Image: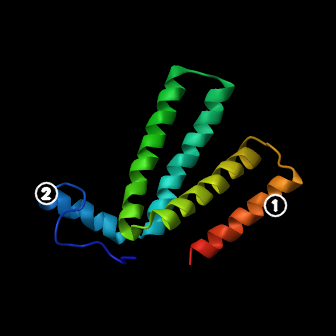
Amino acid sequence: MPSSLPSSAPVVGFSGEFGRIVQTIIQVIPAFGWLLVSVSFFAYGEFLSKKWADHPSVSLAIAVVAIDAIGTALWLPAILHKNTLAIVGLLWLLIGAVATVSIGLFVFKETLDWSQWVGMGCAFVALVSLGK
């Protein structure tokens, strides 16, 4: 896995000073940081999705799509850093699952049965072991 991005050419498609600034920002934040930022937008999108399910509206639907699109775009630097879809993708999915379940449990007061708690424990173990 590459530990840093190549510096020979702009990786984001921008040229000149702006491209160098964007590339520097991408390089400074580690892959796991980009994953956390991406999942934060995903989690906010999940929160808005639940709000939309409770009270459907066009404005909430548009907000969900926009927030999810931003979260997806913020995933790109993480995969650029590591270039391993299997691990980075699975980490994103597990962090996203934990965020989604946390929002359901703590914000919307949903409940899990014992087998779902076991599944969450397994997801946490997987997250820790893959993050090494």
Q: Residues within 10 Å of mark 2 (few under 14, many from 20)?
A: few
Task: Using residue 108 as the reference point, say whether residue 81 is left or right of it.
Answer: left
Q: Earlier in the sequence, mark 2 or mark 1?
A: 2
The quadrant in which the C terminus is found is bottom right
Residue 15 tag number: 2
Count numbered badges in the picture: 2
Amino acid residing under circle 1: Val
In the rendered image, the residue lying farthest to the front is 86
The disc placed on residue 118 is 1
Asked if residue 50 is positioned above or below residue 116 in the image, the reply reads above
Distance of label 2 from label 1 (alpha carbons): 49 Å
Do residues under tags 2 and 1 come within 8 Å of each other at their CB atoms?
no
Q: Is residue 61 left or right of residue 118?
A: left
11 relative to 110 in the view: left or right: left
Quarter-wise, where is residue 129 in the image? bottom right
Q: Classify residue 32 as left or right of residue 108.
A: left
Q: Which residue does the image show at 48% across and 42% down from the upper left?
A: 68
User: Does dot 1 land on a helix, a strand or a loop?
Assistant: helix
Between residue 124 and residue 103, name the one nearer to us: 124
Residue beneath the point at 41% across and 53% down: 74
Q: Residue 22: x, y in percent?
A: 25, 60
Check residue 54 in the rendering and tell me which mark sits there, or answer none.
none
